[in-house]
Image: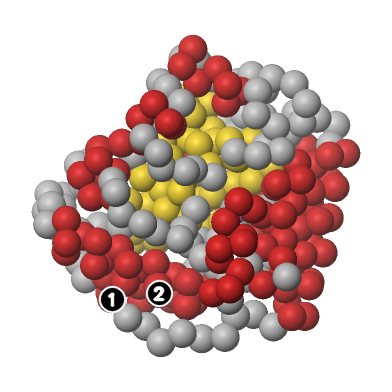
Amino acid sequence: MLLSRPFPSFSAIAKGAATAMLAALLVACSSGGGLYGPIQGDNRPHSGVDRARNMPIQGIDVARYQENVDFRTAFQSGIHFVFMKATEGKDYLDPNFRTNWVRARDAGMPRGAYHFMTWCSLASEQAAWFVQNVPNDFDALPPVLDLEWNNHSSCKTKPSRADALEKIRYMLDAMEHHTGKLPIIYTDMTFHRDILQGEYFPNAFWLRSTAAEPHERYGNRVWTFWQWTQTGVVRGVRGEVDRNAFYGNQNDWITFLLTGCDPRAIASLGPTGRCQSAK
């Protein structure tokens, strides 16, 4: 386990809160709207995720495949946030990450970085790589740990459940230590069933479910973000893009921006020293 370190200073938190509130106001005033009605934009819509299209806080996640994203246009059209691939394993950096990071910030779009966990290198190596490449920006969303089996890579290793959980918790600690924010866990149905089902984590969950609502696929796992399609269409993004929804309303979203925590968990997380700006 890593040694704990102080969370960001009050001045940094206050500055971040001001930035987040400004971003929220910009979204509310954007010409594209998208706050109160159904948001279309899916090349192959599935009726099982119809509710997601009506949820008020919409976002995307991007990697090198989306190439030159126009974050300002996406933001003004009603996209409230973006998660972008940063690192993978112990030595891969998404070639578009640094450009995406700066462009999303300059567009005023709340953005967060994600690390894709691999099972053929040590968690300590992956943590060091993430820390080396992902800025510790006070105004960023919490970092994301992407947990899936590496079926499409040269790494075919599948660790035991105990070993995987040990590596996951090490990585989560390292990411929190680096950013001062409680990381979000992204996962799919298979990995959740094999490794995460029944395990407690204080972290917010971001669940992939493109043909049904998350509660139909993940049981009683409480979710904060829902990836509801991989065939989304969004202004400012070339080709298809993953689309996501935040669970709550505009007030819940502002609270998340201000604290980095799911509003429903603040009461339990606050005493641990997290979500400090909510006090």
| Residue neighbourhood size for the residue with mark 2, other residues' Cα within 10 Å, grouped as few (<14), some (14–19), many (≥20) | many
What label sits on residue 161 in the rendered view?
none
Kind of residue at disc 1: Ser
**CB contact under 8 Å: marks 1 and 2:** yes
Q: Residue furthest top?
A: 47
Residue 34: image location, x then y, percent: 75, 28
Residue type at mark 2: give it.
Ala
Q: Is residue 97 left or right of residue 81?
A: left
Q: Is residue 55 visible?
A: yes
Q: Name the quadrant containing residue 244.
A: top right
Residue located at (79% from left, 52% from top): 23
Give the mark nearer the N terminus: 1 vs 2: 1
Residue closest to the eye, 205 or 99: 205
Q: Residue, x 39% and y 67% (percent of image)?
A: 172
Figure check: 279 above or below 218: below
Residue nearest the observer in this picture, 69 or 212? 212
Residue pointed to by mark 2: 174
Which numbered marker is on residue 124?
1
